[in-house]
Image (cartoon, rainbow, N blue to C red):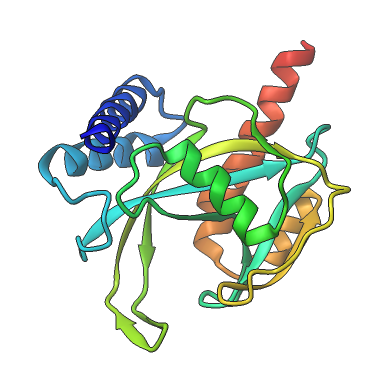
């Protein structure tokens, strides 16, 4: 009963956060509406059992002075990418994002810059084979959080998911990714948002 109560409470908290989230651009405005509609109409929106679309959490991980970004080389997508993973029934997506960073990069000192949502995305996932089983094309309805970590802490790969973990400058991060849509629509946006947040602090 406690777990069920936490699920419902965290789900409602997330929905409230998404509702009050101010979209950064047209992409986020469209995806915000899509994500809210999907959560409200699908009881299994947080489970991979929903093979059409399900919730995921991503992390844009920066160092203390915001000069570096942490990325992993993703085995399925064959590209350097941000970190994150499936909700898998959990509705506290910030906790999911933090856990995924720790698991995927092998680091322990990870903290949210803010507990508020940093960005929203609807992400297409092409059909692929995972653990010997074919996974049909679907959508990841994604909530992104801005996290901070120590770029001096030793990192390690999670061999079943990635084959590289490294810190890059924002400019290097854009060049390392081989996924044009992510570069143009997601990573460039996140870099821009991170910079504007830093300027707001120092302004």
Q: Position of residue 146 (x, y in %)?
A: 60, 35
Q: Residue at x 26, y 55 (%)?
A: 47
| Towards the viewer: 76 or 93 | 93
Q: Is residue 136 left or right of residue 68?
A: left
Quadrant where the N terminus sits is top left
In the orientation shown, which residue stands out farthest toward the bottom? Answer: 132
Asked if residue 133 is positioned above or below residue 42 in the image, the reply reads: below
| Towards the viewer: 18 or 181 | 18
Asked if residue 188 is positioned above or below residue 47 in the image, the reply reads: above
Q: Position of residue 145 (x, y in %)?
A: 54, 37
Asked if residue 8 is positioned above or below residue 126 in the image, the reply reads: above
| Towards the viewer: 173 or 141 | 141
Q: Residue at x 51, y 50 (%)?
A: 185
| Towards the viewer: 106 or 176 | 106
Q: Quadrant of residue 19?
A: top left
Q: Position of residue 107 (x, y in %)?
A: 72, 52
Q: Residue at x 33, y 85 (%)?
A: 133
In the orientation shown, which residue stands out farthest toward the right? Answer: 152
Asked if residue 82 is positioned above or below residue 108 in the image, the reply reads: below
Q: Position of residue 66 (x, y in %)?
A: 78, 35
In the orientation shown, which residue stands out farthest toward the front? Answer: 1
Quadrant where the C terminus sits is top right
Q: Residue at x 39, y 42 (%)?
A: 27
């Amino acid at each position: 009963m406690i777990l069920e109560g936490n699920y419902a409470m965290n789900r409602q908290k997330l929905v409230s956060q998404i509702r009050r989230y101010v979209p950064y651009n047209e992409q986020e405005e469209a995806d915000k509406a899509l994500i809210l509609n999907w959560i409200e109409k699908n009881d299994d929106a947080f489970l991979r059992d929903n093979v059409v679309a399900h919730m995921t959490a991503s992390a844009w991980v920066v160092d203390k002075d915001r000069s570096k970004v942490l990325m992993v080389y993703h085995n399925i997508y064959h590209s350097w990418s941000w970190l994150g993973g499936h909700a898998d029934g959990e509705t506290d997506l910030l906790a999911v994002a933090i856990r995924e960073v720790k698991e995927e990069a092998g680091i322990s000192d990870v903290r949210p810059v803010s507990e508020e949502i940093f960005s929203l995305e609807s992400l297409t996932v092409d059909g692929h084979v995972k653990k010997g089983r074919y996974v049909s094309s679907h959508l990841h309805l994604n909530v992104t959080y801005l996290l901070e970590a120590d770029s001096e802490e030793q990192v390690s790969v999670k061999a079943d998911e990635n084959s590289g973990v490294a810190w890059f400058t924002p400019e290097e991060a854009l060049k390392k990714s081989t996924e044009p849509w992510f570069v143009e629509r997601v990573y460039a946006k996140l870099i821009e948002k991170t910079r504007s947040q830093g300027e707001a602090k120092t302004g």
